[in-house]
Image (spheres, helix red, strand yellow):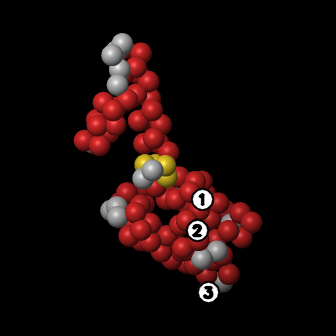
C-alpha cells in the first residue's frame, strides 16, 4: 500500500470513531451524528489535513466538534432555524411568548 491509501484508510477509521463517540456521548443516533459531523467545518479540515488536525485523538476531535457545532444539544443549523421561527412568530404575534417557541421546539 502506498502512503495515500494508508492516509485515506486512517481518515476513514478516524471519522468512524468520531461519529460513534459523538453518538454515544450525546445520546443520539449514528445517523444524527453523521449529519453533524459531515456538515461540520471539522470534517473538511480533517479531509484536507489542515494543520495535521487529523492526527489528534478522536476524543479531542469530538470535543472540538461539539464546541464548534453544537449549542445546547442543537446543531448550528437547528439553532438558526429555531431562532428564525421565533423571530417570525414575534413579528406576526403581538402576544409572542418565548416559552411558546421553546415548547414547540421540544415537541419536534
Residue 100 point in image, percent of width and height: 30, 30
> What is the C-alpha distance between the residues marked 3 and 1?
27 Å
Badge 2: residue crowd in 10 Å (few <14, some 14–19, many ≥20)? many
Q: Earlier in the sequence, mark 2 or mark 1?
A: 1
Residues at marks 3 and 2, CA–CA distance in whole angstroms: 27 Å
The residue sitting at 60% across, 77% down in the picture is 57
Q: Nearer the viewer, residue 56 or 89?
A: 89
Question: Can residue 104 be spotted in the picture?
Answer: yes
In this view, the mark in front (2 or 1):
2
In the rendered image, which residue does mark 3 sit on? 1
Residue 96 vertical placement versus 51 (above, below)? above
Q: Nearer the viewer, mark 3 or mark 2?
A: 2
* Tag 3 near tag 2, CB within 8 Å: no
Image coords of residue 82 (percent x, y): 41, 35
Q: Which mark is residue 42?
A: 1
Q: Quadrant of residue 64?
A: bottom right
Disc 3 + disc 1, Cβ < 8 Å: no
Image height of 107 relative to 60, above or below: above
Task: Tell me which residue sits at (41%, 68%) in the image.
Answer: 25
The earlier-in-sequence mark between 3 and 2 is: 3
Cα separation, mark 2 vs mark 1, equals: 8 Å
Q: Quadrant of residue 67?
A: bottom right
The quarter in which the N terminus is drawn is bottom right
Q: Residue furthest left?
A: 107
Residue contact between numbered discs 2 and 1, judged by CB atoms under 8 Å: yes
The secondary structure type at the circle numbered 3 is loop
- Tell me if residue 43 can be seen: no
Tag 2 residue: 61
Is 77 or 15 nearer to us in this picture?
Answer: 77
Amino acid at each position: 500500500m502506498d502512503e495515500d491509501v494508508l492516509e485515506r484508510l486512517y481518515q476513514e477509521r478516524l471519522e468512524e470513531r468520531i461519529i460513534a463517540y459523538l453518538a454515544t456521548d450525546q445520546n443520539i443516533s449514528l445517523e444524527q451524528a453523521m449529519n453533524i459531523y459531515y456538515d461540520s467545518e471539522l470534517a473538511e479540515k480533517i479531509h484536507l489535513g489542515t494543520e495535521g488536525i487529523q492526527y489528534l485523538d478522536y476524543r479531542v476531535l469530538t470535543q472540538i466538534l461539539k464546541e464548534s457545532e453544537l449549542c445546547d444539544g442543537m446543531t448550528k443549523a437547528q439553532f438558526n432555524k429555531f431562532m428564525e421561527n421565533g423571530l417570525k412568530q414575534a413579528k406576526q404575534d403581538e402576544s409572542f411568548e418565548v416559552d411558546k417557541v421553546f415548547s414547540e421546539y421540544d415537541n419536534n
